[in-house]
Image (cartoon, rainbow, N blue to C red):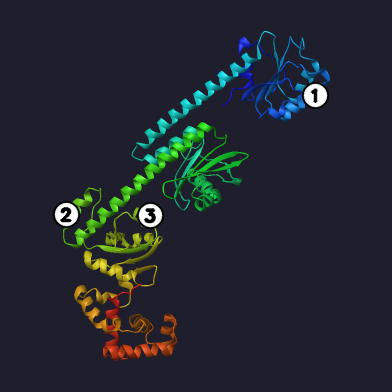
Amino acid sequence: MAPTLRRVAAIAPLRLRVLAGGDALDRPVRWVAVSELEDPTPFLEGGELVLTTGMRLSADDATPYVTRLVAGGATGLGFGVGLSHDAVPPSFVEAAGAAGLPLLEVPRETAFIAVGKAVSELLAAEQYEEISQGFAAQGRLTRAALRQDGARSVVDRLAREIGGWVLLLDEAGAVRHAADAAVTDRAVTDRALTGRALGEGGVDDWAEAAARSLEPELARLRAAPALASLAVVTPGEHAVVRPVGRGGFLAVGSRRGFTPTAHTVVNAAGSLLTLLLEKGREQRATAARVRTAVLRLLLAGETSAAAATLAELGGTLPGEPVCALACETADPEALADALPCFTAPWEGRLVALADPADADGLAVRAAEFGRVGVSAPGDLRTALDQAERALASAAPLARFGELAGQGLLSLLDVDAARSYAAALLAPLRRYGSRADLVESLRAYLAGNGHWDVAAQRLGVHRHTLRYRMKRVEELLGLDIDDPAARAELWIALSLDPPRG
């Protein structure tokens, strides 16, 4: 932050005297400009202390001269006496006072270059202080990243460093962690962001509301991956939103504007969070591969080796009888995090093994993430098979025991029954026509022999379906109107789920 005019005026060796505008001395001085022009404003950027001896100025020039300086954004006017003017003309003092522009008298003994050097030294000192503070803040953020809960600690530390709030958001814009330097012990807060009221509530309340208000910025960043960050400025709030990791976002806000040092600190935090999130992603992927290996060991009968391997991850296995959940989801990582039981990726699905007493509650929770098939309690191999068959139904949440006829199937030797089913249906699979006779038969039996219902499900004319069923009878040598044949075919189809 640039030094104020009050600080410059207080430098004793300069012997500056404030003649007007004393109430505005806290304005920042960003540079010193020496000019004897009647209108120096074309050469100003704003924030300058303008020094002049009034060589080309008369008393009548006071008001227009001061007006131009104010319009040009000058911080103040230093009037040198002892050369062109023995004293600062009263008209200039009056005009500066009326315009609220600080007017300093610069004595003959004080060279303008001395004022410039003094301001330059103050600016250098301020910049050095900001850089030092920035390095110190980056060090504190790095130490926070080394803690066990590294990402959360970095978010908490960043909120304190900037004296504002911080949100860590996932790919969908949901809050993963939030911190506010002004909110402690879930105290009540009331703030505004991007022009929308966030209401009153604890950390969770304002964080979720803030995340919703930032959706336009998140959408822009998703649409333009090359964007490093976006700024959001309202009368009462300044915010920066930037990507972190693979699809996540970091949002940082403060009631004060962000200095270059603050931007550096935010970027450092973003880099640390990216490293932590990517490291966490790799660790989760490795852990998932280990759990898949554990499931493979269990199916091979190596229970002791599976338990020992899982123990290295800090997990335990449920004993038999066990319930299996077969889950189809677009976000297996989030689902695995949401289920407090053993989970493992398996053949394109996420499999969960649960105690029968917990299975219903876990199934309802899993259904929030996608489709779920749930087995009846039993041994692992049977439970997995039942869960897969339940998942093959059209229901979002299907329990094997509730599927018509499935309870009886659990009594069969699964491997032998599947071999027989495959042999029984093989002529239909080998049929040379493009028509899928297996799925046509499945639809016909599921529709209880009603031609219109089955044809509508397949999206074909009922005469087409009649022709296909005639081919099924010819290829299998069975009468599909015979209840025994229908039962046998339905069991075979149940052991041979739809292929998609």
Mark 2 secondary-structure assignment: helix
Q: Which residue is drawn at 39% across and 83% down?
A: 447
Q: Is residue 130 at all visible to an observer of this figure?
A: yes
Q: In this view, does 309 lie to the left or right of 150?
A: left
Where is mark 3, residue-wise?
334
Q: Residue at x 35, y 53 (%)?
A: 337
Q: Residue 63 carries which label?
A: 1
Q: Residue 117, percent across and down?
A: 59, 16
Q: Residue 434, percent across and down?
A: 36, 82
Q: Residue 348, percent across and down?
A: 32, 63
Distance (Cα) linking label 1 and label 2: 91 Å
- Crowding near the residue tagged with mark 2, few <14, some 14–19, many ≥20 C-alpha atoms within 10 Å: few
Q: Quadrant of the N terminus?
A: top right
Mark 1 secondary-structure assignment: helix
Q: In this view, does 48 lie to the left or right of 451?
A: right
Q: In which quarter of the image is residue 389?
A: bottom left
Where is mark 2, residue-wise?
305
* Residue 429 to residue 386: above or below: below
* Residue 236 to residue 65: above or below: below
For badge 1, the amino acid type reads Thr
